[in-house]
Amino acid sequence: MKARNKVTIFCPFCKGQHIDEGLYAIKPHTVHLCFHCGEKFKVTKPTIGVRLDSNMTL
Ligand SMILES: [Zn+2]
Ligand SMILES: [Zn+2]
């Protein structure tokens, strides 16, 4: 079974989308820090927050 830890996460406090960058985009984690409102929220499985379309065209 393949582990799918890249998901779209939305902050339960401000409903803003949580996108992990840098080191957090490499290491799945259960406690995410929302950069919109500064609140921390916990998820059940270690995950990495990504954009809906994860195609990086920079
Ligand atoms: Zn938030
Ligand atoms: Zn995160």
Image (spheres, rainbow, N blue to C red):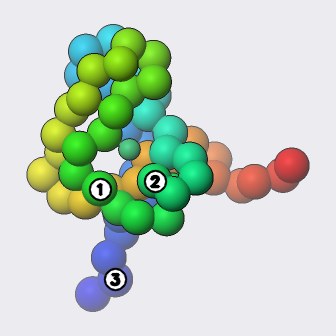
What's under tag 3, amino acid-wise? Lys
N-terminal label among 2 and 1? 2
Spatial separation of the CA atoms under disc 2 and disc 3: 20 Å
Q: Is mark 3 within 8 Å of ligand 2?
A: no
Instruction: Kindly identify which residue carries mark 2.
Output: 24
Residue corresponding to mark 3: 2
| Front residue (pair 2, 38) | 38
Callout 1, which amino acid?
His
Identify the residue at the far right of this view. 58
Name the residue that disc number 1 marks. Answer: 29
Pick whichever, 5 or 20, lies toward us: 20
Disc 2: residue Cβ within 8 A of ligand 2's nearest atom? yes
Give yes or no for contact between labels 2 and 1 (Cβ–Cβ under 8 Å): yes
Q: Quadrant of residue 8?
A: top left
Q: Secondary structure at mark 2?
A: helix
Q: Amino acid at mark 2?
A: Tyr
Could you classify mark 3 by the number of other residues whose Cα lies within 10 Å: few (under 14), some (14-19), or many (20 or more)? few
What secondary structure is found at the residue carrying circle 3? loop
User: Looking at the image, which residue is at 36% across and 69% down?
Assistant: 4
At 27% across and 87% down in the image, what residue appears? Answer: 1
Q: Position of residue 42 (x, y in %)?
A: 17, 40
- In the rendering, at what x and y percent does residue 36 appear? 45, 17
Q: Residue at x 84, y 52 (%)?
A: 57
Picture layout, residue 28 above or below residue 15: below
Q: Residue furthest left?
A: 44
Q: For residue 51, what is the image quadrant? A: top right
Say above or below: 58 vs 13.
below
